[in-house]
Amino acid sequence: MRSISSTLIGVLLAVSGMAQERPPGEVPVLIGYYAGNGDGLEEYRIEQLTHLIWCFGHLQGDSMMVAPEQGAIIGRMMALKERNPGMKVLMSLGGWGGCSTCSEVFGREGGRRHFARGVLDMLRYYNADGIDLDWEYPAVQGPKGHPFASEDRHNFTLLVRELRAVLGDRYEISFAIGGTDECIRQGFEWDAVMPVVDRVQIMSYDLVHGYSTRTGHHTPLRSSKEQPLSTEHAVQLLTALGVPLGKVVIGAAFYARIFKDVPAENNGLFQPGTFKNTIPCSTMDTTIIPTKGWQWYRDETAQAGYAYNASTHEFLTTDDARSIAAKAHYVNSEGLGGIMFWQLVDDRKNEGLLDVMYRALRAP
């Protein structure tokens, strides 16, 4: 299959770069990632999503591969369009620990071309609606031992251009980015990338992560003196770099991070601690409760909830109904493209955080 002509590429770039803001009255996108095994998939409120993203395909040679058992799940996701015909189903490459050869493969012209043509074949086979790139991270260290190089920055531009040339305007192209200054500033040629893609999705979570030795909010909406990184900080940085707000999607977390060995000062917030584990938000109503030693608190500056257990010296940071609603309001007030979350299986199937997000995005 031949790539489309350079003239047509130019036309596509011009067309896709025209919309700088989300048009008035257009509903923001509501994107859910799904990395589950298929159990109970059909029981979720799929009607509330504009996009459902399957995770993850990985590189095998120069091609994105899907395991046979995952192909069956993708088929079930596509079948959900009978309930929500307007929903788009995308397929995602990479994820944390899933892009160990991305720097090498996408650093070669032949690698990019072979990958893009394979993506087209894959999207046609599954009848899916686009590709989501979750390369963690171009030009920045991701998992320890994963190769990265300064050239990744330009090679990412060449990659999305090759994808758009091969996919045309029939399929969507989106990509996820880390919510740190380093990932945003060093990883991408924003003026060249954004005209080619449909949206960029900020992973504005894990801002306090497993390597952290101090507690904080892992997915705060706003910055504070103690924690400058936040959703709003990432959006403001993208705005300063000329990224159109209408193509910016912020992230929410449907899981909590727990730290152990945390002193009680300030109810555990911004204190020394050691990462212990994550838990899905769907379990917190029965586990993070006063009868088990937990007390809930709120940081009004960051617009984030947290909990502390004085008996076990554990600290929990998460999104909750109030912070999700605040993020949805922020999307609407700033004219952003929408909101996404990781991930669907961590939510309750009914009256969970997705329901809160859906209602808040459509509130007057």
Image (cartoon, rainbow, N blue to C red):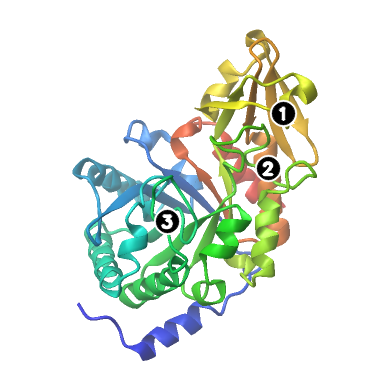
Point out the image quarter for the N terminus: bottom left
Residue at screen point 70% across, 13% down: 310
Q: Which residue is mark 2?
A: 220
Residue at screen point 35% across, 71% down: 163
Q: Which residue is mark 3?
A: 135
**Amino acid carrying mark 1 in the image:** Gln
**Amino acid carrying mark 3 in the image:** Trp
Quarter location, residue 155: bottom left
Q: Does dot 3 land on a helix, a strand or a loop?
A: loop
Q: Does dot 2 land on a helix, a strand or a loop?
A: loop
Gap in angstroms between the C-alphas marked 1 and 2:
17 Å
Front-lying residue, 307 or 74: 307
- Front tag of 2 and 3: 3
**Amino acid carrying mark 2 in the image:** Pro
Q: Is residue 221 above or below residue 113?
A: above
- Front tag of 1 and 2: 1
Quarter location, residue 143: top left
Q: Which residue is mark 1?
A: 271
Residue 313 is tagged as: none
Disc on the earlier residue, 1 or 3: 3
**Residue 234, position as x, y percentages in the image:** 65, 56
Disc on the earlier residue, 2 or 3: 3
Question: Is 44 situated left or right of 215 in this image?
Answer: left
